[in-house]
């Protein structure tokens, strides 16, 4: 059975540099022979179950050995869509918006953070449970600020 694992290592904000915990986790996945996609807010890896599941131990060990304070991990069968709840779907949308805006969301100007919130709303990010908290953390602002950006756009 083919599986997909998506993981995010934290903390996100490390002076605009890709943190070692993220790069070393990616390298562990690559060394295991997994198909990897590295994004600004997370990494997606694919492989057969027998290959992927044991490799995740190495990925987690590499992340924590290189300074990760937390690793969020989701594993599913390849081809199965994520439900509209929880952080996995929001994190994927955050990665899309970060790519559109050209870099880590936490390093954006105030105006670009407002634009990011509007893009996320257009993509349906705020339909997910606890999305405002996840978005706020990625932007480096408070949840209240995210709500203010949304309210200003609606006025």
Image (cartoon, rainbow, N blue to C red):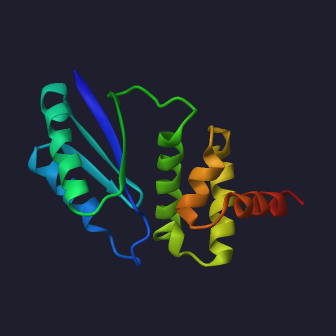
Residue furthest toward the top?
Answer: 1
Q: Looking at the image, is 92 positioned above or below residue 106?
A: above
Q: Is residue 123 visible?
A: no
Residue at 20 percent of width and 58 percent of height: 65
Residue at 35 percent of width and 42 percent of height: 6
Where's residue 95, x and y in %? 46, 55
Where's residue 27, x and y in %? 16, 56
In the rendered structure, the answer to whether residue 27 lies left or right of residue 120 reads left
Residue at 30 percent of width and 34 percent of height: 4
> Quarter of the image holding residue 1?
top left
In the rendered structure, the answer to whether residue 118 lies left or right of residue 39 reads right
Where's residue 80, x and y in %? 41, 25
Q: Looking at the image, is 120 positioned above or below residue 77?
A: below
In the rendered structure, the answer to whether residue 36 lies left or right of residue 42 reads left
Q: Looking at the image, is 113 positioned above or below residue 134?
A: below
Residue at 29 percent of width and 51 percent of height: 37
> Quarter of the image holding residue 113?
bottom right
Where's residue 91, x and y in %? 49, 49
Quadrant of image for the C terminus: bottom right
Q: How many labels does the image show?
A: 0
Q: Can residue 154 be seen in this view?
A: yes
Asked whether 131 or 61 is in front, the reply is 61
């Amino acid at each position: 059975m083919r599986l997909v694992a998506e993981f995010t290592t934290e903390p996100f904000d490390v002076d605009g540099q890709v943190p070692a915990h993220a790069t070393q986790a990616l390298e562990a996945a690559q060394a295991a022979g997994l198909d990897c996609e590295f994004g600004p807010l997370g990494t997606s890896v694919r492989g057969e179950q027998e290959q992927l599941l044991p490799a995740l131990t190495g990925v987690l060990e590499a992340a924590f050995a290189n300074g990760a304070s937390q690793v969020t991990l989701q594993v599913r069968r390849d081809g199965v869509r994520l439900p509209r709840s929880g952080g996995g779907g929001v994190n994927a949308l955050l990665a899309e918006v970060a790519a559109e805006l050209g870099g880590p969301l936490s390093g954006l100007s105030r105006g670009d953070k407002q634009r990011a919130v509007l893009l996320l709303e257009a993509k349906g990010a705020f339909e997910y449970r606890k999305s405002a908290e996840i978005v706020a953390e990625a932007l480096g602002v408070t949840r209240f600020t995210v709500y203010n950006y949304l309210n200003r756009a609606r006025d």
